[in-house]
């Protein structure tokens, strides 16, 4: 019912005012309300409270402040969207802006979600691209051709150390 690219903000405990939640059968400590910045909405509404389920259990997603995710959720009593480890999700970036480059299919997934939501696809121009962390250090130096990685690529950690390098051919 809800799919969005979000940046995680503050997490707070579920309170007595959240009586609409039917959580009496579960431990309320396993839930957190999330404040999020919705970067791109694929399905659902922006006017919603996101509820993380499974906190402190084997179902804990590890949602941390300032990390970016694509979250898939289901409505709970039309006031909340519940997300948990067992739902579909895509981890995009940690709080420092580091991505999971080795197995990263997120650009393709985001373009597929954009197609389903009738949002224009974001094209990458041909040529060399430098991207940066918020601290000003280089995140990646990579080439593109026809919207796909092409040529030599170097990826760095937020501290400036090299994470990986490799060659792409289209």
Image: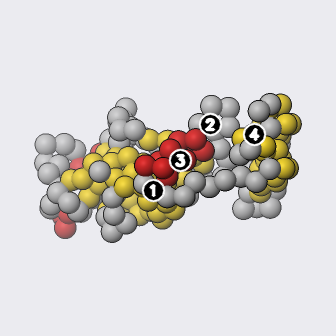
Residue 111 percent across, percent down from the top left: 55, 47
Measure the alpha-carbon separation of dots 3 and 2.
11 Å
Per the image, label 1 sits on a secondary structure element best described as loop
State which tag comes first along the sequence, 1 or 4. Answer: 1
Alpha-carbon span between mark 3 and mark 1:
12 Å
> Which percent across, then down, holds residue 34?
39, 59
The disc, 4 or 2, on the residue closer to the chain's N-terminal end is: 2
Q: Separation of disc 4 and disc 3 at Cα?
A: 16 Å
Q: CA distance from mark 4 to mark 2?
A: 12 Å
Q: Give the mark nearest the N terminus, 3 or 2.
A: 2
In this view, the residue in front, 4 or 11, is 4
Residue 110, labelled with which disc?
3
Residue 56 point in image, percent of width and height: 37, 41
Residue bearing the label numbered 2: 104
Q: Residue at x 44, y 41 (%)?
A: 89
Answer with left or right where residue 23 lies relative to residue 154. Answer: left
> Residue 81 has which mark?
none
**Residue for badge 1:** 118
Say few, some or many: other residues with alpha carbon within 10 Å of mark 3 (under 14 / 14 to 19 / 20 or more): some
Residue at figure coordinates x 62%, y 55% from the top left = 122
Which callout, 1 or 4, points to the residue nearer the camera? 1
Left or right: where 86 falls relative to 102? left
Secondary structure beneath disc 4? strand
Under tag 3, what secondary structure?
A: helix
Gap between marks 1 and 4 measured at Cα: 24 Å
| Residue nearest the viewer, comparing 146 with 132 | 146
Q: Nearer the viewer, mark 3 or mark 1?
A: 1
Tell which circle, 1 or 2, labels the residue nearer the N-terminal end.
Answer: 2
Q: Is residue 151 left or right of residue 16?
A: right
């Amino acid at each position: 019912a809800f799919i969005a690219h979000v940046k995680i903000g503050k997490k707070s405990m579920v309170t007595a005012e959240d009586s609409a939640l039917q959580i009496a059968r579960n431990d309320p400590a396993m839930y957190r309300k999330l404040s999020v910045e919705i970067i791109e909405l694929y399905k659902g509404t922006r006017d919603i409270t996101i509820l993380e389920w499974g906190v402190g259990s084997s179902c804990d997603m590890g949602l941390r402040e300032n990390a970016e995710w694509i979250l898939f959720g289901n409505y709970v009593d039309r006031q909340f969207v519940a997300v948990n480890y067992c739902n579909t999700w895509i981890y995009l970036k940690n709080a420092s802006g580091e991505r999971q480059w080795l197995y990263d299919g997120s650009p393709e997934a985001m373009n597929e979600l954009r197609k389903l939501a009738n949002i224009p696809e974001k094209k990458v121009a041909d040529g060399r691209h430098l991207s940066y962390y918020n601290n000003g250090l280089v995140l990646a130096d990579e080439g593109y051709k026809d919207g796909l990685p092409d040529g030599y690529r170097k990826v760095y950690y937020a501290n400036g150390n090299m994470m990986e390098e490799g060659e792409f051919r289209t």
